[in-house]
Image (tube, grey):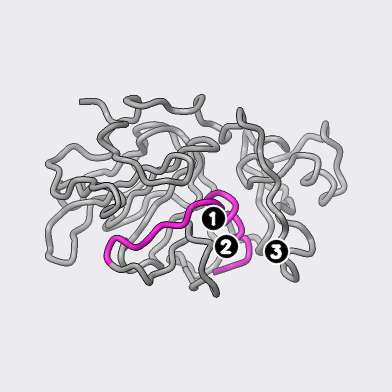
Amino acid sequence: MTVKRQYVVTQALISLAVASMLGACTTYPWDTTQAPAPTYRTAGGAAANGVPAGFYRVNPGDTLQSVAGAFGQRAQDIAAWNGLTLSSPVAPGQVLRVAPPAYAQATPVPTPAPATTTVPGAPPAAAQGVLMWPLRGPILKPFIAGKSKGIVIGGRTGDPVRAAAAGRVVYAGTGIEAYGPLVIIKHDDTLITAYGQNSRLLVQEGDAVAQGQPVGEVGVDSNGVPSIQFEVRKDGKPVDPLAWLPH
């Protein structure tokens, strides 16, 4: 796992420490309580955008403020690390440092974001009942507080798995065996959704996604049953996804 990929996931999920769906000893991208961290790789094995660890290539529509928000940094810090001012424009293709220059030697202390900060491209903080179903199908495994972290939704292999709300992809990879190909989306400073057990991923880390946008395709579980694992975390704690979905 590159420093950039580890840093992005850690910053986005710094307060989340959850147990495995299938075993309590497995370490996950949102679990920062165990060390050392495991190695995760996307299909290409390196950073998806082709820039060095700790850097980000600007996309159309990005601003200094939106890039800072996406990586859990302060805009003034991003500006300082890149010799810019807060009013400096950024251009598509420009490469920005998004991790502290000394990150490789010492883990920085995260800077708390204002409560009103949202992920670039995302709507205001989602409220209960406004997430959309990532997949329509039977609930094969329900959420049980203290025993499970989400729900399992049955489907058909290859069906699209859709983002439950707009946000920013903070993890997209295949390095966690219990989840298979996994996508994690940060919707705002308090809400995160996870989509596991895909057969194919359709997004990369750093992508801004719209509500309803396909982020993966339905895969099968260890018993060959077509389904996905869907989890919702509010303020770092697993909550029942059904409380957040329309009935």
Magenta range is: 1-22
- Image position of 62 (left or right of 161): right
The amino acid type, in three-letter code, at marker 2 is Gln
Q: For mark 3, give the secondary structure.
A: loop
**Mark 1 packing: few (<14 Cα in 10 Å), some, or many (20+)?**
many
Q: Residue at x 26, y 51 (%)?
A: 229
On the image, numbered disc 3 is attached to which residue? 107
- On residue 229, the disc is none
Q: Is residue 221 part of the magenta span, yes or no?
A: no
On the image, numbered disc 1 is attached to which residue? 9
Nearer the viewer's eye, disc 2 or disc 3? 3
Residue 67 place in picture, x, y as percent? 66, 41
Q: Nearer the viewer, residue 68 or 105?
A: 105
Cβ–Cβ under 8 Å for marks 1 and 2: yes
The amino acid type, in three-letter code, at marker 1 is Val
Residue 221's quadrant in the figure? bottom left
Q: Earlier in the sequence, mark 1 or mark 3?
A: 1
Q: Is residue 127 above or below residue 50?
A: above
Looking at the image, the residue that sits furthest to the front is 146
On the image, numbered disc 2 is attached to which residue? 6
Residue 10 place in picture, x, y as percent? 57, 56
Nearer the viewer's eye, disc 1 or disc 3? 3
Cβ–Cβ under 8 Å for marks 2 and 3: no
Instruction: Please tell me how many numbered marks the rendered image carries.
Output: 3
- Image position of 87 (left or right of 210): right
Q: Nearer the viewer, residue 234 or 86?
A: 234
The amino acid type, in three-letter code, at marker 3 is Thr
Q: Residue at x 79, y 61 (%)?
A: 101
